[in-house]
Image (cartoon, grey):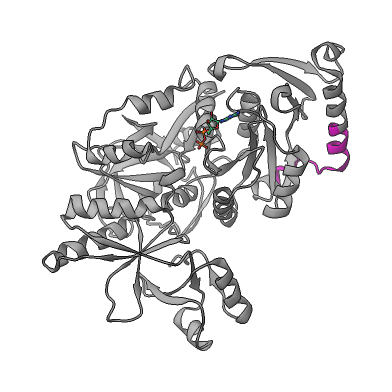
Amino acid sequence: MSTELESELHKAVDSRRNFAIISHPDAGKTTLTEKLLLYGGAIHEAGAVKARRAQRKATSDWMAMEQQRGISITSTVLQFEYQDCQINLLDTPGHQDFSEDTYRTLAAADNAVMLIDVAKGLEPQTRKLFEVCKLRGIPIFTFVNKLDRPGREPLELLDEIEQELGLVTYAVNWPIGMGDRFKGVYDRKEQQIHLFERSAHGSREAVDTVVDLGDARIEELLEQDLYYQLKNDIELLEGVGPELDLELVHQGKMTPVFFGSAMTNFGVELFLKYFLDYALKPGPHSTTVGEVTPIYPEFSGFVFKLQANMDPKHRDRVAFIRVCTGKFEKDMTVSHARTGKTIRLSRPQKLFAQERESIDVAYAGDVIGLNNPGVFAIGDTIYTGQKLEYEGIPYFSPELFAVLRNPNPSKFKQFQKGVSELREEGAVQIMYSVDEAKRDPILAAVGQLQFEVVQFRLQNEYGVETLLELLPYSVARWVEGGWEALNKIGRVFNTTTVKDSMGRPVLLFRNEWNCNQLQEDHPELKLSSIAPVV
Ligand code: GDP
């Protein structure tokens, strides 16, 4: 490799951090994202992201669907700079638009920020997303939000994370007061107190007075009870808490914890600073030719998300690629591992919020959007040089199931084609009954929106009106060892067996309880909530 390219790649990778926020709706993800962008200088006034979203006009049915529901289907990655770091924040769709894409995005993330509401603690969506992060073993940083409101005791929350998620916690900063009396945070490493002043709605960076713990001014600045409480808490943390161990953090076993309030900007900048210090840079990935590192001189990456109809004028599809090695350049020609085709990447896009911007270069840790005239599927690898393939992205556990019917026999072909293409694109999982007479596909989704998108697109793009019949299941499990393992145990109760699109058995249950029951009756049966990648 030319030394010039080598040093360019080193420099790019050293300055890159890529992460996704995992949280339950309402924990403050939008607010925190805006504030991070505010500190990153990408926008000058927080609130601009939302405002711009509202300003957008409905330009297509697709967009209309988004607007009707007040959700964003299309944002994917936000790139901003802070202190010489290039930060890529991968957007994980939440709320009603929670879908398998949310999980897949985590396959492209090097770090996760787990955002928790101080009053609510761990919530269901956060736990689910945590499981996916745990499976990948990526570092998890915790931001406890809304300290300006009354909430639970910080120590109690740390305990909950330890007990329920099995993570060791290390508080990097510690809150001073809570609710109306939330005054600031204590930075344990620097042994400094940050006292904040509120600005109007937190639209500007918070005014931050920094004093050392031993500074005599503290007595004037901080009410006595808060000061004593802080001193006690620090003693306790230093006395019984573990030391910060970055190796454990990078293995996803220890989570650095931060406290703050995204709305008032308290603690946001401190979080960003330490996050950049402690987060993993883009690292090696497993491939068919062994591990490759980001400074491998050939370009390669994988598709983690496909998006249809982002630009109504072109009715195009965009494939989002996570760059893993080398340097991406506009107009370069790459190989497509699955089909062996050669493709010229002529219209690459970097996505800033909703707006598209053309890009010239990208490095490991970056995400690029490529026009996808039906070439790409989820998990596909593109590369230059020697052939390699990244591990695919698994199917994630669906929780909603429905039979999809085509009432019009003359549309049979379009229906089949549409269902098969939407499945390949990853819009929804498709399963089938084991009863050969029942040939209607069963849609299996993580979020309700996926059903709506499938029906909407079948009608719009394939001209097929469909009927949906919801099924009463909420849990799906793949069987390790396939049919052979399943047949060995004979008849199973309180579950329905179906096959996935690869013909593998999947057990559907009405609820977790039924699933646990089967596991208790047949401990020899190994069930998995995530489909093995083949
Ligand atoms: P998301 O659903 O996770 O994206 O959450 P949002 O960012 O939309 O926030 C949900 C609600 O919580 C909004 O009303 C926010 O104004 C509010 N919120 C977010 N962060 C804070 C915070 O630090 N303090 C308080 N009091 N409210 C907050």
Give the percent coordinates (x, y) of residue 382: 35, 51
Is 244 covered by the magenta stretch?
yes
In the displayed structure image, the side of residue 59 where residue 301 appears, left or right: right
Residue located at (29% from left, 41% from top): 65
Residue numbers of the magenta segment: 233-247
Name the main secondary structure of what is drawn in magenta.
Answer: helix
Q: Is residue 7 left or right of residue 193?
A: left
- The total of numbered circles placed on residues is 0
The foreground one among 269 and 5 is 269
Q: Along the horizontal axis of the image, is 262 left or right of 3?
A: right
Inspect this view and state whether residue 473 appears.
Answer: yes
**Quadrant of res 394:** bottom left
Front residue (pair 168, 177):
177
Q: Quadrant of the N terminus?
A: top left
Q: Position of residue 457 (x, y in %)?
A: 24, 51
Q: Is residue 97 magenta?
A: no
Taking the spot 84% from the left edge, 32% from the top edge, the residue there is 234
Quarter of the image where ligand 1 sits: top right
Q: Can you say whether 105 is above or below 39 in the image? A: below
Residue 507 picture location, percent across and down: 47, 73
Name of the residue lying farthest toward the left: 410
Compared with residue 239, is residue 40 higher up or lower down, i.e. above or below? above
Asked whether residue 288 is in view, the answer is no
Give whichever of 160, 276 is nearer the camera: 160
In the image: residue 510, left or right of residue 188: left
Residue 311 x/y as whole percent: 24, 37
